[in-house]
Image (tube, helix red, strand yellow):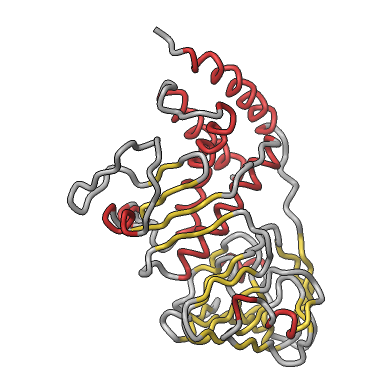
């Protein structure tokens, strides 16, 4: 016997899927492009594009002979070169990098800037990060952020005002969540052992998935989301996750929990251990992109129905979320 709720759910998701099929055949030309002029020698750049492997950067910018960044967690520089194998393999959104250009002439570089990073997680000590705020912001205005009361900001030489995509040094006395853009509709509750790299990847991919649903299907998340990032069930409970109807009474089974991610009307929970179990520890953006495409589909389902999903057929609830994840991958290829 079909549940009454399914009669509402089916036509709503059928319309959503029809829109998706129409979009699938269209070319994706929405990626914004930022043009930089890189001078001979070292250039400080804030990376605001999609994650890119260092080898792909060298292919796109053949005049570059070296790229390096500061790893705040390890407190050391990491580098990549087209001639020598280094230890910087991938450049992630929010990362500040230095690109060394060979020759005697400036180089025009066209790069994507479709991935702003409005929240940057800083490690204690020095951090080299991207600026994702507005253009023309003075260093004094940047320093006035309530998040940076005890931190120090140092811009590269001759930089007096920050533009979107610049690189900036920040000396933090302790771990800091820096909201460079106010009004970001998400909060993060993360385990203390989660790295800044993983937290930055989680935030950027959650915002990217929200934007993808808005751009592709004109569906907007109409709630302020809380994102939970934990390593095990006991740790999650210690972070005081509220009681939610999607799981009923949450019980821990030793150190194992059967879910790697799940969602409710206004939250998403991710078990960070799945990032390592599934072999994605070097590619956190790939992992979080799939997770948030899937889980935000459930958040939208809650919005459409305005009630729990437990009374709906699991094949439809999960099937739509899985289809969205695959569909987004196809569009990206």
Which part of the image, by quadrant, shows the N terminus?
A: top left
Left or right of 289? Residue 184 is right
Q: Residue furthest right?
A: 136
Query: Does the rendering let one see residue 205?
Result: yes
Q: Position of residue 227 (x, y in %)?
A: 48, 53
Q: Is residue 276 visible?
A: no
Seen in the picture, residue 59 relative to 280 is either above or below; the reply is below
The residue that appears at 54% across and 35% down in the rendered structure is 324
**Whole-percent x and y of residue 157?**
72, 92
Q: Is residue 85 left or right of residue 192?
A: right
Q: Position of residue 253 (x, y in %)?
A: 19, 46
Residue most extreme to the top: 1
Vertical arrangement, residue 69 with respect to residue 208, above or below: below
| Quarter of the rendering containing residue 36 | bottom right
Q: In the displayed image of the protein, which residue is found farthest to the left? A: 254
Query: Residue at 49% across / 46% down in the picture?
Result: 267
Instruction: From the viewer's side, name the closer residue of 330 and 10.
Output: 10
Q: Nearer the viewer, residue 263 or 279?
A: 263
Residue 243 against residue 103 in the figure, above or below: above
* Residue pictured at 60% horizontal, 26% vertical: 17
In the current view of this chain or complex, which residue is farthest to the bottom?
157
Q: Position of residue 307 (x, y in %)?
A: 50, 28
The image quadrant where one finds the C terminus is top right
Number of callouts: 0
């Amino acid at each position: 016997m079909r549940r009454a709720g399914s009669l509402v759910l089916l036509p709503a998701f059928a319309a959503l899927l029809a829109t998706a099929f129409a979009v699938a055949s269209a070319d994706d030309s929405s990626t914004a492009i930022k043009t930089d002029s890189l001078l001979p020698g070292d250039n400080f750049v804030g990376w605001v594009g999609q994650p890119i492997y260092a080898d792909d950067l060298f292919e796109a910018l053949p005049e570059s002979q070296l790229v390096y960044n500061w790893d705040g967690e390890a407190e050391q520089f990491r580098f990549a070169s087209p001639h020598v194998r280094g230890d910087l393999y991938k450049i992630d959104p929010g990362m500040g990098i230095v690109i060394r250009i060979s020759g005697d002439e400036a180089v025009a570089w066209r790069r994507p800037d479709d991935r702003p990073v409005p929240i940057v997680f800083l490690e204690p000590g020095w951090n080299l990060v991207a600026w994702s705020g507005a253009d023309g912001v003075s260093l004094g205005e940047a320093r006035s952020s309530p998040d940076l009361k005890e931190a120090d900001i140092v811009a590269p030489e001759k930089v007096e005002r920050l533009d979107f995509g610049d690189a900036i040094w920040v000396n933090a006395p302790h771990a800091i969540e820096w909201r460079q853009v106010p009004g970001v509709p998400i909060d993060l509750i993360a385990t203390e052992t989660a790295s800044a790299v993983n937290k930055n990847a989680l935030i950027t991919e959650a915002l990217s998935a929200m934007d993808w649903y808005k751009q592709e299907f004109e569906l907007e998340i109409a709630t302020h989301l809380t994102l939970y990032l934990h390593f095990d069930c006991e740790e999650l409970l210690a972070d005081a996750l509220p009681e939610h109807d999607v799981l009923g009474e949450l019980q821990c089974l030793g150190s194992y929990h059967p879910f790697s991610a799940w969602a409710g009307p206004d939250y998403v929970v991710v078990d960070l251990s799945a990032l390592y179990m599934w072999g994605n520890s070097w590619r956190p953006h790939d992992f979080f992109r799939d997770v948030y495409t899937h889980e935000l589909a459930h958040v939208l389902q809650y919005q459409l129905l305005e009630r729990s999903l437990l009374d709906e057929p699991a094949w439809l609830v999960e099937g739509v979320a899985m289809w969205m994840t695959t569909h987004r991958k196809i569009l990206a290829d």
